[in-house]
Image: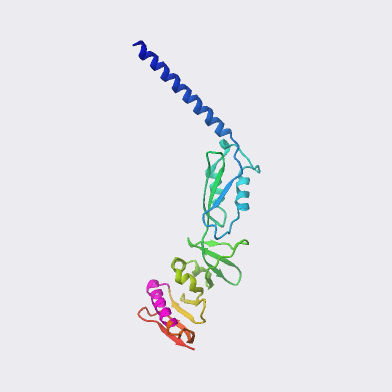
């Protein structure tokens, strides 16, 4: 019985030491100064936002100081502030074990650039307006015509289809939204107009265009066409110059 009592005392003592050490290290961890932020970009091949720009946003959240105690950090607020930037889609901010402030930034993905008489802007993958950047210009299709129709969900779906398809992304460089809502496209290497029509039967139309393009290039006839009409889903109608 006496032996069991001693064992219990030892266990309580060990447990107390563990709690003390945990509290001590936690307190020291909270008091630790955060070192210079470590910023990582998920899609760094399109540098619309620079490390300096993100670092400035972080410093502004620290009240103008480059270092701050870990216990004073509001990581959620910092993320929300970064996400408000017009070029940033999402961010994740956390503190590593060694006290470094890690910031992972995902920039917005432009899928087209719209031109009108007064301004120019990108359409991002979510279908929202995205301003131009002084740091980088994206190689995306140029869109002319009705700006309001350019933000229509069906037109954005068309842009997404082009962006996600290697062949279309390489070949379709521009399009005009006509007054009746129909679309005319331009190919990168050839001067003909692609009469696409409205944003219906997109899969069928693009499949027809790919089949036409492959055959026309092989037959060396592609330079003789002025218009490629895809509006009739069962056939491609070509007009020669």
Q: Position of residue 74 (x, y in %)?
A: 55, 41
Q: Position of residue 213 (x, y in %)?
A: 43, 79
Pick out the residue farthest to the right. Answer: 64
Picture layout, residue 123 above or below residue 186: above
> Bounds of the magenta span?
199-217
Image quadrant where residue 201 sits: bottom left
Kindly tell me whether residue 230 is visible in this rendering: no
Q: Position of residue 180 (x, y in %)?
A: 47, 77
Q: Residue shown at 53%/68% (left/top)?
A: 140
Please check the rendered image and state whether residue 206 is part of the magenta-colored stretch, yes or no. yes
Image quadrant where residue 44 sits: bottom right
The scheme the figure's colours follow is rainbow
- Judged by its main secondary structure, the magenta piece is helix
Pick out the residue farthest to the top. Answer: 2
Q: Nearer the viewer, residue 118 or 140?
A: 140
Picture layout, residue 11 above or below residue 241: above
Q: Nearer the viewer, residue 8 or 71?
A: 8
Q: Residue shown at 49%/81% (left/top)?
A: 193
Q: Nearer the viewer, residue 216 or 49?
A: 216
Q: Position of residue 164 (x, y in %)?
A: 44, 66
Please check the rendered image and state whether residue 212 is part of the magenta-colored stretch, yes or no. yes
Pick out the residue farthest to the bottom. Answer: 241
Picture layout, residue 34 above or below residue 135: above
Instruction: Using residue 93 as the reference point, say whether residue 209 is left or right of it.
Output: left
Q: Residue shown at 61%/49% (left/top)?
A: 55
Kindly tell me whether residue 125 is visible in this rendering: yes
The N terminus lies in quadrant = top left
């Amino acid at each position: 019985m006496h032996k069991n009592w001693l064992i219990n005392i030892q266990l309580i003592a060990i447990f107390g030491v563990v709690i003390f050490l945990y509290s001590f290290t936690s307190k020291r961890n909270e008091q630790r100064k955060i070192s210079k932020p470590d910023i990582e970009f998920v899609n760094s091949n399109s540098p619309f936002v620079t490390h300096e720009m993100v670092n400035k946003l972080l410093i502004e959240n620290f009240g103008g100081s480059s270092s701050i105690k870990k216990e004073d950090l509001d990581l959620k607020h910092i993320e929300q502030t970064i996400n408000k930037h017009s070029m940033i889609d999402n961010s994740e901010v956390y503190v590593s074990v060694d006290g470094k402030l890690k910031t992972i930034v995902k920039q917005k993905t432009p899928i087209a650039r719209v031109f009108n008489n007064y301004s120019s802007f990108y359409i991002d993958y979510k279908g929202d307006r995205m301003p131009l950047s002084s740091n980088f210009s994206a190689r995306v299709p140029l869109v002319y015509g009705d700006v309001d129709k350019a933000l229509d969900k069906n037109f954005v779906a068309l842009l997404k289809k082009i962006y996600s398809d290697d062949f279309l992304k390489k070949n379709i460089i521009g399009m005009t939204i006509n007054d009746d809502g129909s679309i005319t496209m331009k190919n990168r290497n050839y001067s003909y107009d692609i009469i696409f029509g409205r944003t219906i039967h997109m899969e069928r139309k693009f499949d027809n265009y790919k089949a036409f393009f492959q055959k026309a290039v092989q037959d060396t006839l592609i330079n003789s066409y002025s218009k490629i009409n895809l509006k009739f889903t069962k056939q491609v109608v070509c007009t020669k110059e």
